[in-house]
Amino acid sequence: MLLNLILLVVLFGTQKKKWNPYVAALVLGLIKFAIYLIVSKNLLWAVIVGSGFAALGSAMVYFLKRLDKSEDQDANAAPVYKPLDSQTIKFRWEYIPLVVAVLAILLGEMLFL
């Protein structure tokens, strides 16, 4: 689980760099593939798990990009000044699959072991 947390931080960190974040998701899948290949010695199982983690990482990157894009569009709108007590947080549907992907990456080991 600690390795999953470290890989997740690296995946979040690629958003700040000029690297392609999908490459980081692929690297996450390759690392998981190598770990499961060494531990289980079953190539098919390692490919399935590695592909699953790469897909979850890619989904996470996709929804993070969607959230960033919609926040940029809101920033270009004309500012509207309201009292502090009336400010609300906009709920975006992208939060739900993003949370599911993050939890699946962090807790995915419990499902496979």
Image (cartoon, rainbow, N blue to C red):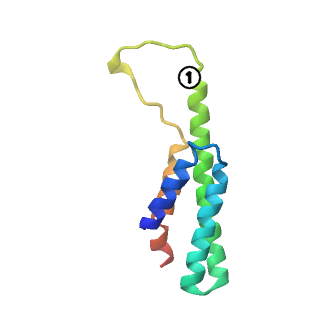
Count numbered badges in the picture. Answer: 1
Query: Residue 94 at x, y = what percent?
Result: 55, 43
**Residue at 61% from the left image edge and 40% from the top image edge:** 66
- Which of the two residues, 91 or 52, is positioned nearer the viewer here? 52
Q: Secondary structure at mark 1?
A: helix
Residue found farthest to the left: 85
Left or right: 69 in relation to 7? right
**Residue at 67% from the left image edge and 48% from the top image edge:** 20
- Which of the two residues, 85 or 34, is positioned nearer the viewer here? 34
- Tell me the crowding category of disc 1: few under 14, some 14 to 19, or many 20 or more residues within 10 angstroms, Cα based: few
Q: Amino acid at mark 1?
A: Ala
Query: Residue 29 at x, y = what percent?
Result: 62, 66
Query: Residue 61 at x, y = what percent?
Result: 60, 49
Residue found farthest to the bottom: 41
User: Against 33, is 63 above or below?
Assistant: above
Query: Residue 33 at x, y = what percent?
Result: 61, 73
The residue pinned by badge 1 equals 75
* Quadrant holding the N terminus: bottom left
- Which of the two residues, 104 or 91, is positioned nearer the viewer here? 104
User: Against 66, is 103 above or below?
Assistant: below
**Residue at 48% from the left image edge and 54% from the top image edge:** 9
Left or right: 79 in relation to 84? right
